[in-house]
Amino acid sequence: MTGPRNSAEKINPACGIDVAYVARLARLQLNADELATLQGQLEQIVEFVRKIRELDLSGVPPTSHARVTPNVFRADEVRPGLDSETTLANAPAHAYGQFAVPKIVE
Amino acid sequence: MNIGTLTICGALEELRAGRCGSEELVKELIAVIRRRDPEIGAYLSLDEESALTQAKEADRARAAGQARRLSGIPLAIKDILNVRGQPCTCGSRILQGYTAPYDATVIAKLRAEGAVFLGRTNMDEFAMGSSTENSAFQLTRNPRDPSRVPGGSSGGSAAAVAADEALAALGSDTGGSIRQPAALCGCVGLKPTYGRVSRYGLVAFASSLDQIGPITKTVRDAALLLSVIAGRDERDSTSVDLAVPDYTTGLTNDLRGLRLGLPRECFVAGISPDVEATVRRAVDQCRALGAEIVEVSLPHTEYAIPTYYIIATAEASANLARFDGVRYGLRAPEAANPIEMYGKTRAAGFGPEVKRRVILGTYVLSGGYHDAYYLSAQKVRTLIARDFENAFATCHALLTPTTPTAAFRIGEKTSDPLQMYLADIFTAPANLAGICGLSAPCGQTPDGLPVGLQILGPVFGEANILRVGHALEQALAGDGAA
């Protein structure tokens, strides 16, 4: 299909996916082998999904949800939720009724 | 009682007539599981003791005249739905050891109607896959040919039903994960309309696409389970406040008055000739049952998979951010700070397909790429939804193959992610458009592999697609073809 291109035109093919960079954004600490494999695979997959560039999308509104519902409200009343004992039962580490994590502030 | 052919409706008749009890039913199913599951691998965990307790309770209730719609009916549950006190691994190492602290809404509804929970079924990790080979724990084999995959991601649920290790099961469907394994295993699989069933307690993969639905031996059983699990739930704001009919009452043996569309884009090169021939025979059968068959067009079909893999992975990358080693599941030891803990935990806990999708999803949402990929994909989504609106303006339902091929061999597509993605080519459009879809067995290939007919309906059009599936099922049973 030809015709005017949409904003996908802005994709610069020279700026393909940099898996090492995106993995850092995604908080995935990958080893060198994984990075090499994923780099090759994701270049192919990105090329594949770029197929949508063929379409003229000017004037087409985006769909974020299959059914867009207005905000749904309920009465603002306190109700019981999971208690902390139940919640902490699945925690890898907890102390003083709270989730324990490695030190954040030096 | 022949456990092999027993359906939910059949079992309810037995129970009502007093010819068997739920306890006996559960014991028989556990015996089948012990015999067959070492080969099939449908279940990740079995909860014999709790199932027997629930069954005895159901038997007592029935004896006391307090039977409900599903009293004593044992079900298998995909390991992505929270069942209080049970594991919920999502097929992932990152949730190994997690115990569900509450019931998903669908589980609470089934429980309230007396259903019994047998165990948890295998799946592709976080529902990402089309063969169940992405489970971190085990392979599941297709009961119709153990050298082949059961499909995915709800492959354990479909295999359990096909191997007679469960009367029925629940699955979840984000791009075909109920319908595709149902087709490959010879079961009925229903993806309800987006908003028909509450997802509270379903571990989220792609929130604008996910739906929960049944995998069963018959269309009537699927209709019955939908009648129980559907409905508005204030814990899922996307669930719709719309009356839930008894979907079993509209099932008829003819299709008079229905106009069914054949999308020409679903009968093209790339589809297996055996699958196409089987589906075309089913279409002829629908015509013989009184339906009017017309050709329609869904012109953006070829863009559905690229669109799906942008939207689903974007949403997944956000949803899976919660697996960071803080509140539940795995935590990598020896991290000096939280950032290192997240990175190491997620690297150790996620398998290769989940990593691929989280990275793709993060990429399409990242600065400079969001508009080009994610926003554009949302616009294509609009075009795909409009295609369906146009088709449903003249048709009650659409007929397509559920899958382009019958079950493929274990290992056949694992080295090529893109080939695996294309297994969802006919199912993913329904999730993007939010419409409902049913896969019903419609025959088999010359090799004896099941073929699924997909029946797509408009938003909240479940009654008609169930009617088509049921009439076809009855006709094929009469012919001895299915």
Image: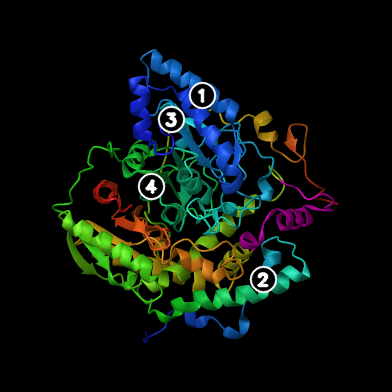
Q: Are marks 4 and 1 on the same chain?
A: yes
Q: Residue B54, which numbered label?
A: 1
Q: Nearer the viewer, residue B165 or A87?
A: B165
Identify the residue at horizontal 51%, vertical 24% (top origin). Answer: B54
Residue occupied by mark 3: B73
Residue B14 in the image: above or below residue B348:
above
Q: The disc numbered 1 marks a residue on which chain?
A: B
Identify the residue at horizontal 42%, vertical 40% (top origin). Answer: A73
Asked where in the image residue B416 lies, by quadrant, the reply is bottom right
Type of amino acid at the residue the image marks with label 2:
Leu
| Mark 4 vs mark 1: in front | 1
Question: Could you tell me how far apart the alpha carbons at marks 4 and 1 are, in whole angstroms?
Answer: 30 Å
Q: Residue B195, which numbered label?
A: 4
Q: Is residue B249 left or right of residue A93?
A: left
Question: Could you tell me how far apart the alpha carbons at marks 4 and 2 are, in whole angstroms?
Answer: 35 Å
* Residue B234: percent from left, percent from top: 43, 37
Q: Residue A38, which numbered label?
A: 2
Residue A24 showing in the rendered view: yes
Q: Quadrant of the N terminus of chain B?
A: top left
Q: The disc numbered 2 marks a residue on which chain?
A: A
Asked where in the image residue B249 lies, by quadrant, the reply is top left
Type of amino acid at the residue the image marks with label 3:
Ile
Q: Is residue A37 left or right of residue A102?
A: left
- Start-end of magenta stretch: B330-355
| Mark 3 vs mark 4: in front | 3
* Label 2 secondary element: helix
Type of amino acid at the residue the image marks with label 1:
Gln
Q: Are marks 3 and 1 on the same chain?
A: yes
